[in-house]
């Protein structure tokens, strides 16, 4: 399959999110993510506004569901989301409920292994319970806490190959990746590449002469899209 570029709209204002989304799509981004901060700030309204503005674009609602799985997935599906996110650390019944809601409302489920004591086992569990994608995720607080203690900050690439080899569904690596590492993810078998927004693009290879964010993002999308990864 060809790699997919997803932009995470980790913003707290819907107007800013819409503006960033439009820019990203012009640059070649494939999927939009209503990030957790946007969902907390704008709720269903934020997802509905994204759907109204971009009727044909896949929209991921990063709910990080831990309970009440069916209702949360149902609400986001009705608001226009095409994908929802459930956590591997949730009870198995919650994951099953989200998967059932996905079947009932025609949306896909992304399972997130953030915080799992065994990240590979967490990824396997998510696939076994019916998730369509696995998000291999090292959390922000975890990374910062470990770094503050003077230890090496963990990175999704540390176990990415093991996660990819353990499951048969597409994998996405999230958390603390540099821009260069994100671009390389398809070569590690993870075809769903997430770019955070607000974006800070400081990689010399992708900085345009005039600092044009859209042009820089277009270069990044091109570098990701030109790669080939195994079919799923």
Image (cartoon, rainbow, N blue to C red):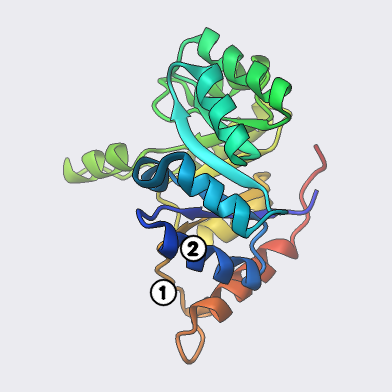
Identified at 44% across, 18% down, the residue is 89
Front one among 49 and 201: 49
Q: Is residue 34 left or right of residue 172?
A: left
User: Which residue has dot 2 on it?
Assistant: 179
Q: CA distance from mark 2 to mark 1?
A: 8 Å
Q: Is residue 156 left or right of residue 218?
A: left
Front one among 211 and 183: 211
Can residue 213 be seen at all in this image of the molecule? yes
- Which quarter of the figure has residue 148? top left
Q: Is residue 74 left or right of residue 12?
A: right
Question: Residue 82's spot in the image, x, y percent?
Answer: 66, 39
- Which quarter of the figure has residue 147? top left
Mark 1, secondary structure of its residue: loop
Farthest residue, direction bottom: 209
User: Can you say which quadrant of the picture contains the C terminus?
Assistant: top right
> Does residue 17 sit above or below 188 in this rendering?
below
What is the number of the mark on residue 60? none
User: Which residue has dot 1 on it?
Assistant: 202
> Does residue 122 sit above or below 220 in this rendering?
above
Identified at 45% across, 85% down, the residue is 211
Do tag 2 and tag 1 residues touch (Cβ < 8 Å)?
yes
Identified at 73% across, 54% down, the residue is 56
């Amino acid at each position: 399959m060809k790699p997919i570029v997803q932009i995470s709209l980790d913003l707290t204002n819907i107007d800013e999110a819409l503006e960033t989304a439009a820019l990203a799509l012009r640059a070649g981004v494939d999927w939009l993510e209503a990030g957790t901060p946007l969902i907390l700030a704008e709720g269903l309204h934020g997802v509905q506004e994204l759907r109204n503005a971009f009727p044909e674009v896949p929209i991921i609602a990063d709910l990080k569901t831990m309970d009440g799985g069916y209702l949360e997935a149902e609400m986001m599906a009705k608001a226009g989301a095409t994908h929802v996110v459930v956590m591997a650390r949730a009870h198995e019944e919650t994951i099953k409920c989200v998967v059932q809601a996905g079947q009932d409302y025609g949306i896909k489920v992304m399972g997130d292994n953030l915080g799992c004591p065994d990240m590979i086992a967490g990824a396997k569990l998510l696939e076994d319970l019916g998730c369509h994608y696995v998000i291999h995720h090292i959390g922000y607080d975890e990374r910062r806490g470990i770094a503050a203690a003077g230890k090496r900050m963990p990175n999704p690439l540390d176990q990415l190959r093991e996660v990819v080899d353990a499951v048969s569904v597409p994998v996405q690596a999230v958390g603390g990746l540099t821009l260069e590492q994100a671009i390389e993810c398809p070569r590690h078998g993870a075809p769903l590449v997430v770019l955070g927004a607000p974006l800070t693009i400081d990689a010399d290879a992708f900085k345009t002469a005039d600092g044009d964010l859209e042009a820089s993002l277009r270069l990044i999308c091109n570098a990701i899209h030109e790669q080939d990864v195994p079919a799923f």
